[in-house]
Amino acid sequence: MRLATFQPQLGVHCETTTLRNMIHHAGADISEAMLFGLGQGIDFQYWDAPDPGRGAPMLTGRIEPALLSRNACKALGVELREARSPDPESASAAAAELLEAGHVVGVSVDIFYLDYFSSRSHFASHYIALYGLDDSLAHVVDTEQQGGAQTLPAESLRRARASDEGFMPSPHLHLYVERLPARLTTDTDAVLREQIWNAIRLTAQRMSGDRGPRFGIRALRRAASEIAGWSDTLASPDETVPGVGRFWRFAGTGGANFRKLYREFLLEARQRYGDSELDSFVEDFGDVQRQWDQAIDMLTAYRRADDGRGQLEAVAARLNAIADAEQAVFEGLLVSAAKRAGEQV
């Protein structure tokens, strides 16, 4: 079974790419950046390394998997369905049934088992959009970095979906869009415009608050303080430190990727809402993105640095500057969002 009218939609982050493909096939054309913003996707999260000393903690730039899709669909009035099958056979049967009913199916997978993926590590918090499946082949859409529309052996997809290894595994989980509200397809622009400031408010509220040492700005400062000493605390810093830089730059969970997406969301919001007050926030997020890129450049250059510890101290200083900048911009957005809410009362 393969959806005959399906048109792949490209994106840079796995979950928003998957969500965009599901919603587009259901009848609404919404950008990845808009879905990311309405999904309140930006964050910073600190997850302890399974084996401290041998590896770095998992440092991500987004909220938890699937929560972004739930938030975006709630804002849009879209019925999002989630289900988990008990075994590979049931998972394949459920996917085939949904395809027969005309749905694009979002599936959670471990990248280790995807034939087209260059990475040979387990990461089980990846999403792809499934639009065709038979006994031998699966047709999916991944991120632009992974080539967009791909075909792989059905058995590889089965293994990828069944994996319980890697970061935040969700074996046999699938998502799909039940139906779209009629107004979202006939007046998409108006629906988006109505939801933008509420999504900004909720995101800014969360990012401005103190949610402990594992989430948000406080987690970013914690990461900065620990990175400064990685030359002494990591068993193989020459391998691990550049690896973190590459992860932040190229992986869907990376730092600068999501800052760029949020800037694009604010820019699109400015165009739709016609509010010039957003101009300064678009500019501020451009600066945040540049600072993330600078921190990543320093991490990837660690092995070539004359003074490794000094290099990491410079990274820590940059991350603390990023934390200051993000704190300021989200506090500013919260003030503006409150003003907009007052104007609408």
Image (cartoon, rainbow, N blue to C red):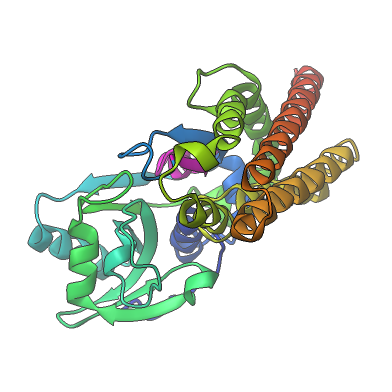
Q: Give x and y (percent) for residue 265.
A: 70, 48
Seen as rendered, the residue at the extreme front is: 306
Q: Is residue 9 visible?
A: no
In the image, is residue 320 above or below residue 344? below
Relative placement, left or right, of 153 versus 11 is: left
Q: Tell me: 111 left or right of 267.
A: left
Image coords of residue 25 (percent x, y): 46, 66
- Tell me which corner region of the image, top left, top right, bottom left or bottom right, holds residue 144: bottom right
Q: Is residue 264 above or below residue 228?
A: below
Quadrant the C terminus occupies: top right
* Residue 184 image position (x, y, % from top left): 57, 50
First to last magenta residue range: 57-75
Nearest the eye: 196 or 194: 196
* Depth order, front residue of 227/175: 227
Query: Residue placed at 54% from the left, 31% from the top?
Result: 226
Residue at point 31% right, 39% down? 51
Q: Is residue 24 visible?
A: yes
Does 2 sit above or below residue 102?
below
Q: Residue furthest right?
A: 276
From the viewer's perspective, is residue 342 above or below residue 196?
A: above
Left of 95 or right of it: where is 302? Answer: right
Residue 291 is inside the magenta segment: no
Quarter location, residue 203: top right
Residue located 55% across and 27% down the image = 219
Q: For residue 64: magenta? A: yes
Total numbered labels placed on residues in the image: 0
Q: Identify the residue at horizontal 49%, vertical 77% (top origin).
A: 147
